[in-house]
Image: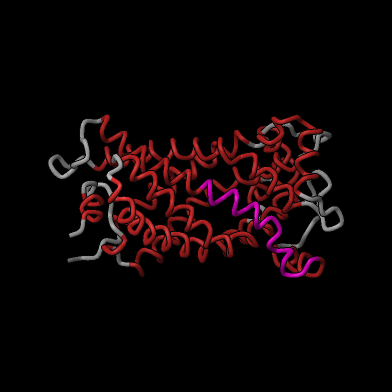
Amino acid sequence: MDASSSRMQTFGQTEINWDKLDKTKFYVVGAGIFTGVTVALYPVSVVKTRLQVATKDTVDKNAFSVIRGILKTDGVPGLYRGFGTVITGAIPARVIFLSVLETTKLAAFRTVEPFKFSEPTQAAIANGLAGMTASLLAQGVFVPIDVISQKLMVQGYSGHAKYNGGLDVARKVIKSDGIRGLYRGFGLSVMTYSPSSAVWWASYGSSQRVIWRFLGHGTDLKEIAPSTWTIVSVQAAGGIIAGATASCITTPLDTIKTRLQVMGHEKRPSTRQVVKNLIADDGWKGFYRGLGPRFFSMSAWGTSMILAYEYLKRLCVKDD
């Protein structure tokens, strides 16, 4: 066993390597688990998106007023606008993301091993590189889904057009702008999600090491195997820390990207114009519109996803 594999195995009680998994079971069971998590947390994304595209004349100035407005107008189904489109695209995007994440993570650990960094630093670099690479490749599927779902989320709100479902959005976007219309904001999506994913996974990987050391486990978890509850608690704490860090760093780019993607065909503002409008409406704090829901979403979503992900990995370990 090489040094990097040994390093990965020092957390053998809490981490399961990609090559130990039954991939078919992982993807099939994972689709069900992640769909369930998406159902629970999707409304937060709808609220965040509406806050980010609201104009200065919009009555809804906070998350609670947005929720009240949606429930009053559309009832509970209004909190799930665009959900079908997201679920349809999320499965292939997640397959790409998780496959690239795990394979890149192991390669990254091997690459940084010779530099003799501390355990948390190695974890931050390896996880960060893996998260950024996985997100970059997944954007090819995710961006069109993002464009369509966000238009559905804000339809009829603050002057935005109405549509008859995801296919109607796709047809109108392609008719107006061609296929490139479905990739509107692609550059900003890459600039938003790739760094966000890098920060999230780097924070998650390094914070776990720090927490384990704080709990007195050091870097060798083979001597005293932690209980399942302890492992889950540490992973959840890592997810919360990662979500908080990533949301604070990347919310300004996410706000600009969202506005670019949902603007009507006739408006077509440039990135510079979106920035100027945000500053004119709210000053620099305008870039942090939706920070509360994004903070909650990334923390809750990230923690739920990572716990489901880690559980799924334990569930899908191949029998020796």
Q: Which residues are magenta?
A: 177-196
Q: Where does residue 170 sit, x and y in percent of width and height?
A: 72, 66
Q: Where does residue 38 sit, x and y in percent of width and height?
A: 52, 52
- Residue 119 is one of the magenta-drawn residues: no
Compared to residue 299, the image places residue 37 above or below, namely below
Q: Which of these two is toward me, 224 or 155? A: 224
Compared to residue 134, the image places residue 304 above or below, namely above
- Residue 184 is one of the magenta-drawn residues: yes
Position of 158 with respect to 255 (left or right) is right
Query: Magenta: predominant secondary structure element?
Result: helix
Position of 105 with respect to 282 (left or right) is left
Q: Can you say which quadrant of the picture contains the C terminus? A: bottom left
Q: Quadrant of residue 85?
A: bottom right
Colour approach in the figure? secondary structure
Q: Where does residue 161 sit, x and y in percent of width and height?
A: 82, 54
Position of 96 with respect to 3 (left or right) is right
Q: Where does residue 127 sit, x and y in percent of width and height?
A: 39, 49
